[in-house]
Image (cartoon, rainbow, N blue to C red):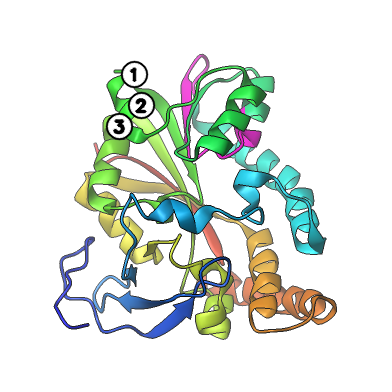
Amino acid sequence: MERKIQCPVCGETLNAPMFHCKDFRISGEMFGICKCPACLFGMTLPQPSPDEIGKYYQTPDYVSHSETKRGIVNKLYHLVQKTNTKNKIRLVERFLPKGGKLLDVGCGAGYFLSVCKEGGMETEGVEVDAGARSKAESRVGRAIYPSLKAAEASGKQFDVITLWHVFEHLHDVRSSFAQLKSLLKPSGLLILALPNPLSADAVHYGKHWAAYDVPRHLSHFSPQSINTLAGNHSMKLKTYAPMKFDAYYVSILSEELKGRGKMCALPLGLWQGYRSNRQARTTKNYSSVIYVYGDKG
């Protein structure tokens, strides 16, 4: 890096890029992954501005927006999505009081919201992508906020706010976390699902780890860094849970990024996903982790 860049989590100076990752989805451009030596936060550099980032999502293969089922990996994604959604619902039900309100940020095409609605929950959503937002609105039968700012402007507060693999996409993690907290009731809980760059599959695949997904993933949170960020906003970790299926899905995608054919990528990815989950039994560094935060008081 030509200039010193401070970690937005703890303020330390970020190291020069550990390596450069390619945007395999769309542009073919290269982006650096810079790491904080103190809290192990990672940052994609350079970062496209909020006005520029939209073009990096314009592909029919971006499954959470397009719901594409082309190819074996996307078919697997949709099969696993049902199980993951059931697990998410069970987690939310543990913390959402009867009659409570839930906000799903980055709701994509609205699949999770629709299942919550069918279960009788009072839900609202935020989605910045116009196409995905339109699909979500059709699916759940109500307007979806186009931004966190628009949700704030409503004056509403929520008992539970969920971000399923969304927070790593947001610009300015400090102000974004502050916005999320402002949308919570004093006793409310924030649920974040994030990829873990300290997992065994991340270490194994390095620059080919699919969950780096540059430049759409602007931030790369270790458990330490996301806990530090929450602490900076007077919130603490209440509990956490692994997303074990992600190790398999991400490993299969990573094998493809390494140039493996689909027939090889599937068994190799499944094996590496198993190895990652097995190692995480000891290290607790699962490929993806769900963090539940509440007020320190």
The picture places residue 46, in percent across and down from the top left corner, at 31, 70
The residue carrying mark 1 is 156
The picture places residue 149, in percent across and down from the top left corner, at 30, 32
Q: Residue furthest top?
A: 99
User: Taking 279 as reference, is 265 left or right?
Assistant: right
Earlier along the polypeptide chain: callout 1 or callout 2? 2
Residue 187 visible in the picture: yes
Is the residue under label 3 in contact with that under label 2 (CB below 8 Å)? yes
The residue carrying mark 2 is 151
Chain part drawn in magenta: 97-113
| 114 vs 82: above or below | above
Query: Residue shown at 53%/76% (left/top)?
Result: 202
In space, the residues marked 1 and 2 are separated at their CA atoms by: 7 Å
User: Taking 155 as reference, is 254 left or right?
Assistant: right
The residue carrying mark 3 is 149
Type of amino acid at the residue the image marks with label 3: Lys
Is the residue under label 2 in contact with that under label 1 (CB below 8 Å)? yes
